[in-house]
Image (cartoon, rainbow, N blue to C red):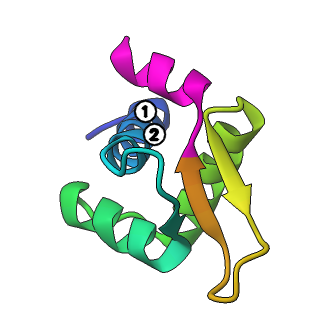
Amino acid sequence: MKTRAERQRILMRAILETLGNLSGYQQPHAALVAAVRLVVYPEPQEAELREVLARLENDACIHRDDGSLDGVRWSITGVGRARLAD
């Protein structure tokens, strides 16, 4: 069984990889969640994803855009790309 910290690292990596594959485009929240749930097992719960997204945003690895008509959209930052490269 994975520890909580290991699980969070897996989720962070999955989020950064998903956003990193978009070449600078923004990803709608629902699409990001669906993509992460496809690659992480057991499937992460919404609260777990919110916590990891907030941590990545606080670390300036991802950017949240609330201004779009279809809700929240996410994108990776330069800091996030650097962390992904490590």
Where are the magenta residues, as a range?
Answer: 76-86
Furthest toward the front, the residue is: 24
Q: Which mark is residue 9?
A: 1
| Marker count (numbered) | 2
From the viewer's perspective, tell me whether residue 48 is left or right of residue 40: right
Q: Name the image quarter holding residue 40.
A: bottom left
Amino acid type at image mark 2: Met
> Where in the figure is residue 19, as x and y percent of width and height?
42, 49
From the viewer's perspective, tell me whether residue 19 is left or right of residue 49: left
Labelled pair 2, 1 in contact (Cβ < 8 Å): yes
> Where in the figure is residue 77, as x and y percent of width and height?
59, 34
Q: Which residue is mark 2?
A: 12
Q: Which mark is residue 47?
A: none
Q: Name the image quarter holding residue 68.
A: bottom right
* Location of residue 83 with respect to 44 vertically, above or below: above
Given this view, does label 2 or label 1 mark the residue nearer the observer? 2
Residue located at (43% from left, 32% from top): 9
Q: Quadrant of the C terminus?
A: top left
